[in-house]
Amino acid sequence: MKNSIAERVCDFLKIYPPFDLIKFKKLLEIAEEVVIVYLEKGDTLFKADQPANEYFYIVRAGAISLFHTENDTQELVTINDTGDIFGVRPLIARENYKLTATANEETIIYALPIKNFQSATENNAKVYKYLITAFATNAYDSYTTEENNAIFKDYLPNTSQDIVNFQTANYTKTPITCAKTSTLQEAANLMCTHKIGCIIVVDNKKPVGIITNSDIKNKIATGKFPITTAVTNIMSSPVITAKKDLTVADGQLKMIKNSIGHLCITKDGTVNSRLIGVLTHHDVLVTLGNTPSVILKEIKRANRTKKLRIARLKANTLLKSYLEQNIPLTHIINVISEINDAVTIRAIEIALKKMPTEPPVAFSWLALGSQGRREQLLFTDQDNALVFEDVPEDKYEETQAYFLQLAKYVTKSLNKIGFEYCEADMMAVNPEWCKSISKWKTQFQNWILSPDDKAILLSSIFFDYSGVYGNEKLVDTLSESIFEALGGSSLFYKFLGSEAIKSPTPLGIFKQFLVEQNGEQKDLFNIKSRGLMPLIDAARLLVLSNQIKNVNNTYERYEKMAEIDPNNKELYESCAYAFKALSKFKTKQGLLHNNSGKFIKLETLTKEEKLKLKRCFKPIHDIQETLKLRFDLKNFI
């Protein structure tokens, strides 16, 4: 006999993630055990610090508000409406609730039994991947799952070894243990001394059991056992084990499958080898809380500059972790670029709310320099511009004043986040960098058709622009006019070429590094001006002279040149590699010294690192020689 209620529940669930990832037969098993709950406005389903129950929930109709309570003050965290999941903490973390759930209006919810759900989805990794990531971001909606899938799909390395590296679990490598012959009192004293919530019971260095605060509360405080009892009487056994190279996702799935909060890491991944660490669900959630999707979600939620800064600082921690795990630099660049753009977008949105009126005309915010090339990994100075639609001459000054004020708010916010003001004032707050589309077109024509050193400096920065926010057509129109003007100026290419070859290979006669000779940076190596900039300038010239549009990143420019000019493929590929290697050196130095990484203290490098650095200079020499021939630069002054 059909269960029509269960089928109706099933038909509803299958529309929403992660239930859309479950086969209908399994989903029907879940639906048959669902409890339907009706709430009046103001009714509370569960409260913060309340012990977790056996259900998690999805809103069928109405809305549920989730509140965080601090110092007797409730702060609204989010409102869940139809199709949104909430109350997942018992499923993922097995902890008391951290938020209070209250009906925002007359509401119907479905309560899904956790045991039943786990049984029906035991081998469905996609379901738990969604729930784990969503739990860390505190967001369970269709948009989030699409965003998370894009992050994981686009930025995961291709090989299985890279995937292992990408999310390697960060476990405790010095676990506190006690012998199998210990008493609980001895074990509890160790836990108290080290301020930990669990202790591993070992026999000949092999894990045989685990004792947690919960065990002590349930088995000792209740009087079931005396404090002097042997640890073997109250420990949970056998322990669940894993290898040291397990991924965060694998660790979390293993915990969910076995309903545990701790994994013992052993030498060979079994209980028959030496204990080398412990992974807790807290470790997993900390790691998941610092993923691209989590950071992007925090950025989009931020309503103040301070919160934007906190989110962007997390990206530096993420960057450091990626470098330590040898994630391919191309993936790192993609991730951090997305985060940088998201920060800028949110800063603009916050600034727009401060303006007295809506923008008078359409506009676009442009990122220039390293952000425009989508290769800005560390905090650097700001380079940006603003282009707005044409207006009548009598309205121009008023319109420009509006956007200059907007730019003032945005650049101030970016400065507080950590992006220094540009010393040369190449920012949208400068009237010279905040113009109408027609005036920008005229400006570029002047730079291109009447080049001089100043024009080359300004235009070369601007040639690496990308639209971050606003009207895309304005950006496209500007690009088309630039390439049209470039078509009739071989002299401009010569000026660009002379800029690209002005810094020769940074090695002296005896192959020693050419370091700074005076000033604060004396004896330091300038990796930006002597290594990166020659490659950046050469790549820019090559794509512009070949009329290649919408390829801004330096290594992608070389990869594109290798594609269209196969005779020089090896040279271009070596330049792409050198750029990525030099960028990695610069980034590591910046993280090490908490600065831009522009100047390197050579004695901090190993012999191997110095040799690798020197190998990057041959492609610089070769590409500069190629430019001299191709653009006839030998006699150009």
Image: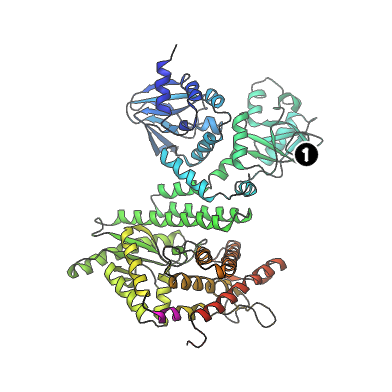
Judge whether 39 appears above or below 423 on screen. above
Q: Which amino acid does label 1 sit on?
A: Arg
Q: Name the residue under label 1.
A: 274
Residue at x 38% of width, y 79% of height: 489
Q: Residue 224 versus residue 247: which sits nearer the camera?
A: 247
Q: Which sits in the foreground, 559 or 259?
A: 559
Q: Is 364 above or below relative to 603?
A: above
Q: Where, quadrant-wise, is the N terminus in this rendering?
A: top left
Residue 541 is situated, as x and y percent measured from the top left of the image, at: 47, 73
State the image coordinates of residue 590 (x, y, percent, origin top left).
Answer: 57, 64
Question: Residue 458 appears in which quarter of the rendering?
Answer: bottom left
Residue toward you, 554 or 376:
554
Q: Position of residue 231 (x, y in %)?
A: 74, 28
Say whether residue 491 is magenta: yes
Most common SS among magenta residues: helix
Q: Is mark 1 on a helix, strand or loop?
A: loop
Decide: is 164 above or below 96: below
Residue lying at 60% horizontally and 56% vertically, measured from the top left: 323
Find the magenta span and give its range: 488-495
**Residue 435 appears in the picture as rendered:** yes
